[in-house]
Image: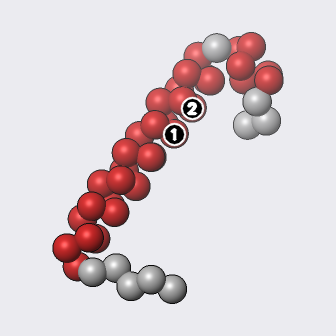
């Protein structure tokens, strides 16, 4: 297991937040379009 140095923690957290943001936006898009919602197993 790789140890995260303190100065990298903030960077990793912001990257995680960006991933979460893109997940949220894609989820909203899927919710707004019924065709996509039926196609994807959500």
Specify the farthest residue to the left: 7
Q: Residue at x 62, y 24 (%)?
A: 30
Identify the residue under disc 2: 27
- Neighbour tally class for label 1: few under 14, some 14-19, many 20 plus, Cα within 10 Å: few
- Neighbour tally class for label 2: few under 14, some 14-19, many 20 plus, Cα within 10 Å: few
Q: Position of residue 7 (x, y in %)?
A: 19, 73
- Left or right? Give the position of 2 relative to 8: right
**In this orientation, which residue lies closer to the viewer: 32 or 6?**
6
Q: Residue at x 45, y 46 (%)?
A: 20
Identify the residue under disc 1: 23
Q: Do labels 1 and 2 touch, CB within 8 Å?
A: yes
**In this orientation, which residue lies closer to the viewer: 26 or 5?**
5
Q: Position of residue 24 (x, y in %)?
A: 48, 37
Mark 1: secondary structure: helix
Q: Position of residue 16 (x, y in %)?
A: 40, 55
**In this orientation, which residue lies closer to the viewer: 30 or 9?**
9
Q: Position of residue 42 (x, y in %)?
A: 73, 37
Residue 31's label in the rendered image is none
């Amino acid at each position: 297991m790789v140890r995260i140095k303190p100065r990298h923690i903030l960077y990793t957290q912001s990257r995680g937040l960006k991933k979460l943001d893109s997940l949220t936006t894609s989820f909203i898009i899927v919710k707004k379009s019924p065709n996509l919602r039926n196609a994807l197993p959500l």
